[in-house]
Image (cartoon, rainbow, N blue to C red):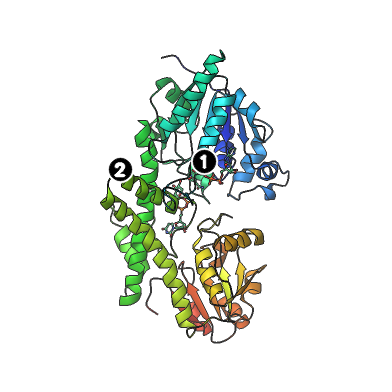
Amino acid sequence: MSSIKVRKICCIGAGYVGGPTMSVIADKCPEIEVKVVDINKERITAWNDTDLNKLPIFEPGLDQIISRTRGRNLFFSSEMEKAISDSDMIFISVNTPTKTKGLGAGQASDLSWVEASARQVAKFAKGHTIVIEKSTLPVRTAQAIKEILNTTNRENQKNEISKTFSVLSNPEFLAEGTAISDLENPDRVLIGGEDPIAINALVNIYLNWVSREKIICTNLWSSELSKLAANAFLAQRISSINSISAFCEATGADIQEVAKAIGTDKRIGNQFLCAGPGFGGSCFKKDILNLVYLSGYFGLPEVANYWNQVVLLNTWQQDRIYKIVLEKLFGTVNGKNIAILGFAFKANTNDTRESPAIRIASDLLEEGALLSIYDPKVSFERVQEDFEEFSFDNQGIWKMANSIPDALKEVDAVLILTDWEEFFGLDWNYLASLMRVPAWIFDTRSVVNRQEIENTGLNLWKLGERS
Ligand code: NAD
Ligand code: UDX
């Protein structure tokens, strides 16, 4: 079999996936030049900032990799045409959010950005180019990409411009907050495709740091579907354990004990069994809804209903937390000060997309609460945007606090929504003295120790435990 030696890679999309993924490829393959391009110029400027604290995304370990590779064989740029035309291999790593309008609105993925990227590749590529789907996409999207590339190619051929394409699917399984270690030591790398030479070229890149047994090659459609299915299975575990958390609260069983007891069964395993305020992040909800849409499209309504329930339960979990806060605070939070600890959808990221904090805080604001929000990595502007998008008739007021004590001053309640390391082991004796009595702690992430809190005289509600 003849082989292709990849010398130049371009990645379209410098987001939470494109940025870290390409940084790791550049780090592990110093002989390959990697260019990451984006239409968002501000984002590119931030990726090029000499102050590594100003990188557009926060991921533990990312700054070190950027300092080793940027300017050596990793480049961030807005010059799409040159980056595409120079490259042997192009990753499409753009956003694929849920459609908000038209057919399939609220479920199907909006592929506008993927299509625009494919058209740019068709226009600017030269010679033979391997085009790789890195974004999470509906099953059979590769067919649409091929059609866009080949149709434009027919026009090129009329003008005697010769270019050819091979399309592969290579979904990304990294989780935010652990992106670098997930990329450096993946459970598996999945490559779907039909062209053995292109598959081999991509396999050879990963072989620089991933062992051959971990590289799974499938057909295109299995690869696309496996990504959606993996996210659906993971999210389903969270909805399952969250449903049991409500059961624990009703019966006196303890969710930590139950999770441990069931997780020690090797067939179940202990990962993704942490009950909490519901899953957030840009992927789970979007990808399950996409699966629901596709199930309907392919005439499988029972399958669609099954997966839709995972999302419904997630929203229910967030709703019931807000209602519990309301109930414990004598049925009203109007004019009451409440601290929110954690706004990111999980620890170790500045990402707030679909964060449970958005819905829960919005509901409290609608009831007239006065919120002071503390998150070690989320900015004021990000929270502001999130509240703007979540339309509500807001009667309450919110502000960002600079520290945990600042957030807790004179509050009637504190609601812990993200499992940031710094929220564990806090000095609650001291913090209780800052709060207004009778004060409540609502712990949705199993962060505090019940005995310790009870010694301070604070009231405690803990998710998955009977009060
Ligand atoms: P993101 O929104 O952070 O980044 C996407 C970037 O693409 C944006 O900066 C946007 O400006 C850019 N873009 C859009 N259209 C473009 C175009 N035509 N030309 C150049 N740039 C363009 O999104 P993300 O979180 O990186 O996710 C990207 C894809 O990866 C999605 O399909 C997502 O489902 C998938 N994914 C995400 C994660 C995650 O943890 N975030 C994990 C696995 C897979
Ligand atoms: C997820 C998938 O894990 C990853 O493989 C895929 O590539 C992208 O989507 P991500 O959303 O970044 O990654 O983070 P993840 O760790 O999966 O957490 C998602 C949400 O579930 C977070 O809100 C997290 O707090 C919540 N979660 C996770 C729980 O509530 N309980 C758990 O046990 C695990």
Image disc number at residue 298: 2
The x and y percentages for residue 182 are: 48, 44
Along the line of sight, the residue nearer the viewer: 100 or 401: 100
Along the line of sight, the residue nearer the viewer: 396 or 93: 396
- The residue that appears at 29% across and 60% down in the rendered structure is 262
* 17 left or right, relative to 308: right
Tell me if residue 31 can be seen: no
- Image quarter in which the N terminus is found: top left
Q: Is residue 69 above or below residue 356?
A: above
Tell me if residue 4 can be seen: yes
Q: Is mark 1 within 8 Å of ligand 1?
A: no
* 326 left or right, relative to 305: right
Gap between marks 2 and 1, in whole Å? 22 Å
Q: Is residue 287 above or below residue 392?
A: above
User: Which residue lies under the disc numbered 1?
Assistant: 112
The x and y percentages for residue 26 are: 59, 33
- The residue that appears at 39% across and 67% down in the rendered structure is 316
Q: Amino acid at mark 2?
A: Phe
